[in-house]
Image (tube, rainbow, N blue to C red):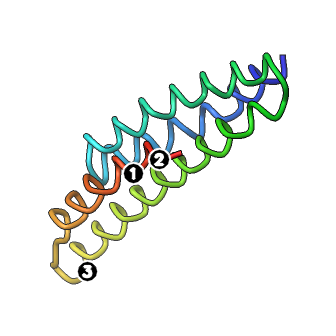
Amino acid sequence: FHSSQNCGHAYPTFLAVLWCAGLLCSQAPAAFAGLMYLFVRQKYFVGYLGERTQSIPGYLFGKRIILFLFLMSVAGILNYYLIFFFGSDFEIHIKTITSAISPLLLIP
């Protein structure tokens, strides 16, 4: 029961940062991170069926993916304000960096 409650409480946060990262930064790395998050939450849920210590890696891995999506969102917002105030666009650089970093999410 507690694992499903935890998943339910984390789901709105996940959706918010996923949408922001996909809309403001880059869609492909955001979609990859979203799929990874779904697999990690499954691992977290299955870990709760055994000992409680088995769910901790899934929990920490999920937090790291949420942090990655949040940083993508912040980078997209900063890029928007740089375009608005200074006229300089770093979208290509941000997309390149997020595309290069997203495979690192596979490292536990």
- Tell whether label 1 touches label 3 (CB within 8 Å): no
* Vertical placement of residue 65 versus 76, above or below: above
Quadrant holding the N terminus: top right
* Vertical placement of residue 94 versus 103, above or below: below
Marks 3, 2: nearer the viewer: 2
Q: Secondary structure at mark 1?
A: helix
Residue 74: x and y, percent? 43, 63
Label 3 or label 1, whichever comes before in sequence order: 3
Residue type, label 1: Leu
Residue that sits furthest to the bottom in the current view? 86
Q: Secondary structure at mark 2?
A: loop
Relative to 90, is 5 on the left or the right? right
**Measured Cα–Cα span from mark 3 to mark 2:** 38 Å
Dividing the picture into quadrants, the one containing residue 25 is bottom left
> Residue 19 shows which numbered tag?
none
Q: Name the residue that disc number 1 marks.
A: 104
- Tell whether label 2 touches label 3 (CB within 8 Å): no
- Tell whether label 2 touches label 1 (CB within 8 Å): yes
